[in-house]
Image (cartoon, rainbow, N blue to C red):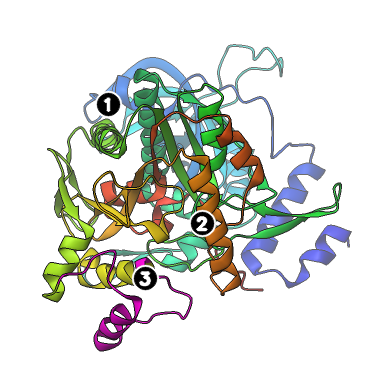
């Protein structure tokens, strides 16, 4: 018994049978994983060109196509197999003993299983039932690499694991992978479920639309470090790692903000980055510890101008992937991203809900009493502005449905934002809410290095008092700011959440490979 077989003794029967087929093919001199496959066209191209054929209609055109075996029916001297390409296009292949030879057909039946990748060469026809098909036939042309005639069929990848089984429930719905299986085995999800493949392509279109729009507005795309000596640019708990070469602890990036502002200082006055961020926090239907964000900064802009930019970005993305700003969500309902979005003052809307005026000067003790009365949990280290935000989230934010910019946040929770030009204790910041969740945030950026240092020092005190999300004093950033940073507006938007807004799906569906806890 070979070492390979010994290792496989405890595997399920289907896997053992397939592994044995692989060994047999190799022992017979066949290659179940060839490099050179004489494909002449794609399944999609074939369907586009010959999809008009009527039942029983035949052509004299020959094609070589490849795909994954999704269905197979072996009926004596005539076998039918359905191949699927990566875009979900399917085509039937027909193999007959008369055309390929009895021995070749016998070999096909012995070698090929559901889930394998298969190449078929033959004449393009429509079967008697109207199914567009390739009728397998050995080609007369000589393949330049193999120096042999094009085969009627060839195995291009032997799948050791079988495809998951699906069945039709009593209500007529197809039952396949569970949600947990879909997330853990995304490759299976993409094979079995068209919606999973569609999401990958939709995500790519959204990213392209963002880049295209920013390029059209004169923004430069830059790259900033993922490994950082200090964590900053957002209020979040970081991941910590260790770099052996420098024998030092480092943080995974929670936001690119401070580096993008250094680009702004350096003269890249309209910059952006589409980046991966990492926050060591909870995971739920709208939060992922690893996520994609877009951040952008524009010199001589403010939070109102950057809000208009964000609205245009999102509406342009919806148009790029759906053709309309009126999008259809996963549950079949429609959601309107069009028009000019509402703008709502944070303190005024909270005051209206409470029936009393709340301002940036409202004492912390009074805010705590309100929170206790409403059952809103407050940590001992929460500053007054944080309590206000928690109250607002429960009373107002969770109930916002239409796209809404929420304006003018507390100064003590926004250390990187410019003071409001009229409202004491508040800053020029908005958060964009869509369907009850936060999608993006935007600032008039603080560019006074003295005030920035004071804000950082205050954050250090907050950290000492137990706030795990507070930022540290970043001397390198402060030195850069002391070189002179132009007035600017900036924004950050979660790409995964943008897809949630357009599709109505949860965050784990929009991320191709979301982080999940190991089961063993």
| Boundaries of the magenta span | 357-385
> At 41% across and 36% down in the image, what residue appears?
87
Rendered image quadrant of residue 239 = bottom right
Closest to the observer, 15 or 447: 447
**Residue 366 lies within the magenta run:** yes
Q: Secondary structure at mark 2?
A: loop
Q: 10 Å neighbourhood of mark 3: few (<14), some, or many (≥20)? A: many
What separation in Å lies between label 3 and label 1 (alpha carbons)? 66 Å
Residue 467: x and y in percent read 53, 70
Q: Compare marks 3 and 1 and give the one earlier in the sequence.
A: 1
**Residue 351 lies within the magenta run:** no
What separation in Å lies between label 1 and label 2 (alpha carbons)? 38 Å
Quadrant for the C terminus, please: bottom right
> Viewed as shown, does residue 321 lie left or right of 4?
left
> At 21% across and 62% down in the image, what residue appears?
347
Q: Nearer the viewer, mark 1 or mark 2?
A: 2
Q: Which residue is mark 3?
A: 384
> Viewed as shown, does residue 406 lie left or right of 31?
left
């Amino acid at each position: 018994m070979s070492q390979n077989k010994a290792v496989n003794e405890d595997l399920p029967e289907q896997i053992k049978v397939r592994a044995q087929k692989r060994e047999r093919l190799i022992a017979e001199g066949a290659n179940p994983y060839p490099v050179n496959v004489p494909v002449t066209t794609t399944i999609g191209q074939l369907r586009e060109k010959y999809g008009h054929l009527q039942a029983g209609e035949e052509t004299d055109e020959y094609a070589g196509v490849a795909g994954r075996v999704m269905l197979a029916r072996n009926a004596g001297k005539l076998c039918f197999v359905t191949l699927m390409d990566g875009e979900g296009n399917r085509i039937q292949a027909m193999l007959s003993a008369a055309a390929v030879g009895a021995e070749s057909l016998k070999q096909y039946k012995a070698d090929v299983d559901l889930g394998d990748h298969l190449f078929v060469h033959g004449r393009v026809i429509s079967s008697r039932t109207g199914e567009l098909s390739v009728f397998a036939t050995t080609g007369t042309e000589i393949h330049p690499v193999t120096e042999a005639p094009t085969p009627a069929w060839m195995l291009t990848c032997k799948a050791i694991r079988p495809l998951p089984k699906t069945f039709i429930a009593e209500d007529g719905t197809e039952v396949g992978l569970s949600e947990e299986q879909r997330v853990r085995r995304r490759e299976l999800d993409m094979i079995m479920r068209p919606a999973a493949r569609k999401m990958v392509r939709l995500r790519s279109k959204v990213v392209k639309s963002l880049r295209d729009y920013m390029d059209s507005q004169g923004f430069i795309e830059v790259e900033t470090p993922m490994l950082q000596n200090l964590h900053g640019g957002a209020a979040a708990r970081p991941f910590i790692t260790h770099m052996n070469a420098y024998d030092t602890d480092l943080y995974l990036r929670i936001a690119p903000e401070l580096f993008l502002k250094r680009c702004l200082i350096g003269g890249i006055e309209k910059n952006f980055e589409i980046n991966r961020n990492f926050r060591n926090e909870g995971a739920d239907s709208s939060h992922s510890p690893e996520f994609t964000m877009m951040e952008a900064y524009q010199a001589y802009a403010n939070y109102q101008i950057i809000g208009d930019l964000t609205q245009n970005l999102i509406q342009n993305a919806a148009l790029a992937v759906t053709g309309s700003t009126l999008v259809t969500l996963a549950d079949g309902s429609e959601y309107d991203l069009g028009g000019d979005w509402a703008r709502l003052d944070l303190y005024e809307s909270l005051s209206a809900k409470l029936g009393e005026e709340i301002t940036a000067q409202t004492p912390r003790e009074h805010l705590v009493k309100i929170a206790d009365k409403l059952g809103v949990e407050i940590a001992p280290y929460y500053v007054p502005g944080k309590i206000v935000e928690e109250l607002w989230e429960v009373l107002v934010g969770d109930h916002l449905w239409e796209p809404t910019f929420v304006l003018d946040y507390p100064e003590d929770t926004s250390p990187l934002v410019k003071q409001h030009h009229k409202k004491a204790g508040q800053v020029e910041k908005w958060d964009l809410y869509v369907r009850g969740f936060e999608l993006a945030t935007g600032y008039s950026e603080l560019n006074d290095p003295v005030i920035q240092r004071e804000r950082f020092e205050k954050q250090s005190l907050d950290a000492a008092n137990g706030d795990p999300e507070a930022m540290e004093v970043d001397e390198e950033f402060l030195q850069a700011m002391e070189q002179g940073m132009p007035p600017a507006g900036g924004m950050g938007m979660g790409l995964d959440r943008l897809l949630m807004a357009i599709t109505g799906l949860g965050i784990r569906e929009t991320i191709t490979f979301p982080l999940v806890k190991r089961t063993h």
